[in-house]
Amino acid sequence: MHVSPRPAEPSTISSPSEAGATAPAATAAAPTPRKFVPRFRREKIDTAGQTPPPETDRWSSGSRSKWAELNGATGDLGTYIPIVLALTLASDLNLGTTLIFTGVYNFVTGAIYGVPMPVQPMKSIAAVAISNPEFGIPEVMAAGICTAGILFLLGVTGLMQLVYRLIPVSVVRGIQLAQGLSFAMTAVKYIKNVQDFAKSKSGGERDWLGLDGLLLALICAVFIVIVNGAGEDQNGNQESTETGDEEGWCSGKRVKKIVFSLPSAFLIFLLGVVLAIIRGPNAVKGFKFGPSRIEVVSISKQAWKQGFIKGTIPQLPLSVLNSVIAVCKLSTDLFPEREITATSVSMTVGLMNLIGCWFGAMPCCHGAGGLAGQYKFGGRSGGCVALLGVAKLVLGLVLGSSMVKVLTQFPVGVLGVLLLFAGIELAMCSRDMNTKEESFVVLVCTAVSMVGSSAALGFLCGIVAHLLLKMRNMSSDGHSCTSVLWFHRNP
């Protein structure tokens, strides 16, 4: 029996002879409007101008390797480990409790959002605790609870979503660029100089040789560049290089495919664990099995006052801008098929700390740098952070606070390499600014944020620069005065 072939799809018709009688209908059809996608996502649009279909599985990224998700899970450790270790050594943070709670946070956020949404320390609060011996655990937890309460209130009332929609994209890009460059500069210090996390100080220059030497860090950096490149989609590049009948290149392509699929960050992290055990063999002997004792933290009136003034006030602008606004914008850029709102992100940050801080868990938030780092190393779904969450939970329940003995021996230069590429990935998000005016606002916001060491100050200067440029162009464009306040809306 003769079976007629399936007619070609309209988007795949290349000539009238291939389509037969259906060609006129295809050519007469109205073109499908193209949806805007940032430059660094345009290579994933098909020939019909459509974005890829929405992913339905929050735990898996389809055909992508599970090794890629595991590799992405380690992309945020360059930020997480140094801050947790510093707080544990300087302020007597309960590491076991922190691992348990942050593990639960990772798993839950992975299930809710379906993207590698990171869980990071609140950096301003951590910086105050590390540098000020009088700012102890009660003050740290009070600061985290106050910050969380405000963020939760902003989310419940819808004010956070309103703020997100009104802030110009160029200002958000400036915050991202400043945060990315800040991560990269900190990473270079980790690689170049010996670090004392307990005192939050850098020592002399790192030796070239040794188990935490400069040469080791450089080799790790070169390995990541070879495997991951500049962060492009390696699968797409590999497919485009396969030309068919050139059999002499088959073996070389096979080797290249294997190399490009290696979980570089995960392998480097495992190397760091092995070196930590070799550097401090007594740390393994000192393991105490079982979780740390979880207790409710007693917070006095004075601790509430000091926590709010010294911790919440400097942390709140950073949390709003980098933990909510920048995270939502970056999520939209990287995962346009996922709808992540500022309201939900603000509420999850609030709920995490309104629960965990009462039991001594480190104040946490989401962060654009962590999301960029996990995406850089292959994280594409909620399963990425869920794997990290399970690992934290197991370590917290099995080893508890005794894990700190191994972390103190972990090669800091290796952490610096992971943090370096996470910072670069975040900074590269600003490259989609198409006009000189947008680039001007980005650079003003970035420069002020970095020189003034304040994301809030950079944000205000970026807003002022944006408004001034709008006012300058108002007369030539024929816009009314009210249009000056109509910012470019975020999606």
Image (tube, rainbow, N blue to C red):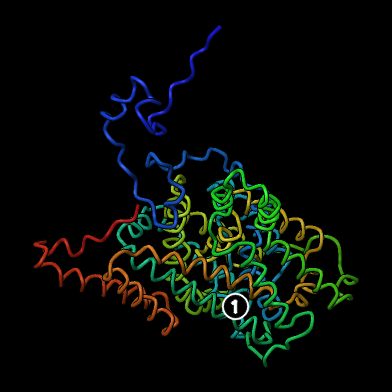
* Mark 1 neighbour density, 10 Å: few (under 14) some (14–19) many (20 or more): many
Residue 311 appears at what percent x and percent y? Answer: 51, 76
Determine if residue 39 is in view. yes
SS class, disc 1:
helix
Residue 79: image quadrant is bottom right
Q: Residue at x 47, y 38 (%)?
A: 53
Is 384 on the left-hand or right-hand side of 176?
Answer: right
Q: Nearer the viewer, residue 287 or 191?
A: 191
> Circle 1 sits on which residue?
187
In the rendered view, tell whether residue 236 sits above or below residue 181: above
For the point 67% across and 91% down, the residue is 205
* Location of residue 207 with respect to 423 vertically, above or below: below
Residue at the image point whose x is 33% and y is 66% from the top = 170
Camera-nearest residue between 31 and 252: 252
Please state the horizontal and vertical placement of residue 347, each as a whole percent of the image: 48, 54
Q: What number of labels is visible? A: 1
Visible residue check, residue 84: no
Residue 123: quadrant of the picture: bottom right
- Left or right: 69 with respect to 391? left
Q: Horizontal and vertical percent for residue 286?
A: 88, 72
Screen quadrant of the N terminus: top right
Q: Is residue 49 above or below residue 147?
A: above
In-front residue for pair 146/205: 205
Q: Quadrant of residue 303?
A: bottom right
Disc 1 residue type (three-letter)? Ala
In the image, farthest residue toward the top: 1
* Residue 41 image position (x, y, % from top left): 44, 53
Side of 341 relative to 247 (left or right)? left
- As drawn, the residue found furthest toward the bottom would be 204
